Image (cartoon, rainbow, N blue to C red):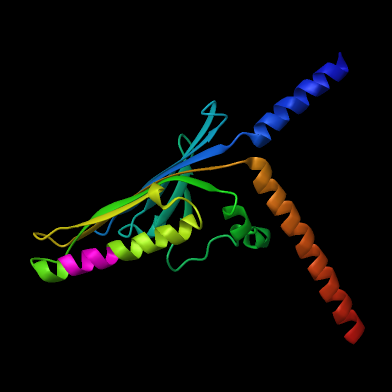
Amino acid sequence: MPLTMLLVLLAVLALILMWPVRVEFDLRLDITRGADGKLRLRFLSGLFVLRYMLEINPDHLRRFIVFYREGEDENVVYRPGRAEKPRDVGWLTLPIRRIWGHVRVKKLCITGTLGIGHDAFHTAMLAGAVGVALQSCALVALQNGNPAVARVYIAPAFNQSCFRINLESITAANPIHIITAIIIYGRRNRKGKRAAWRILSKTS
């Protein structure tokens, strides 16, 4: 019986590690009102769901960037002119590029409007330039993925001054791939630090 339970637990653990985690992100930016976003993490095809909120309000500098989970207290990430708690140095050494290599982008949609007063010529030119720039950034972010999943459209607004952006994305990644990338990077990083320490100790 204990062996059967152990096998069942190992099978469940393997399922959790191999089943892709789906990340859905929706960010809305309005130059006159700030930005707000929604982040949803889905495990095992929605059996477990975590929802987070992000708010950026330029008019309320005491809580400029706020990040919190639904139903929990708000956490102020950044206040202008005031240093927050120092970040853990270990987070800065995460292999972001290696992790991103295991992420599969299934949807990337960037839409918005841009207007410069009643200047139709500059509005059209700037909207086109911003659209091309965002399209290029989207293709770079996709790496060698399918460019068909990316959609970028910036509409010119000829009757008002505005700048609004809406970014929606859906990505998926296997937890075991992310964990493996972090472990391999950590081992190589430790070996590099040890080698540098040996060289420094010999020369000192």
Judge whether 130 appears above or below 42 on screen: below
Residue 152 is one of the magenta-drawn residues:
no
Q: Residue at x 87, y 17 (%)?
A: 2
Labels in figure, total: 0
User: Depth check: 40 or 148 in front?
Assistant: 148
User: Depth check: 168 or 57 in front?
Assistant: 168
Q: Residue at x 63, y 57 (%)?
A: 98
Q: Position of residue 1 (x, y in %)?
A: 86, 13
User: Depth check: 110 or 190 in front?
Assistant: 110
Q: Is residue 192 left or right of residue 165?
A: right
Can residue 101 be seen here?
A: yes
Judge whether 145 appears above or below 20 on screen: below
User: Depth check: 36 or 2 in front?
Assistant: 2
Can residue 74 be seen here?
A: no
Q: Residue at x 28, y 51 (%)?
A: 111
Task: Report the residue that reaches farthest toward the top.
Answer: 1
Q: Position of residue 117 (x, y in %)?
A: 11, 66
Q: Is residue 97 left or right of residue 186?
A: left
Q: Which residues are magenta?
A: 124-130
The image quarter in which residue 107 lies: top left
Quarter of the image with the C terminus in it: bottom right
Task: Report the residue that reaches farthest toward the bottom.
Answer: 203
Q: Residue at x 34, y 65 (%)?
A: 133
The image quarter in which residue 25 lies: top left
Q: Position of residue 50 (x, y in %)?
A: 51, 35
Magenta stretch, main secondary structure, is helix
Residue 129 is one of the magenta-drawn residues:
yes
Q: Position of residue 92 (x, y in %)?
A: 63, 62
Q: Is residue 189 left or right of residue 94?
A: right
Judge whether 94 appears above or below 15 on screen: below
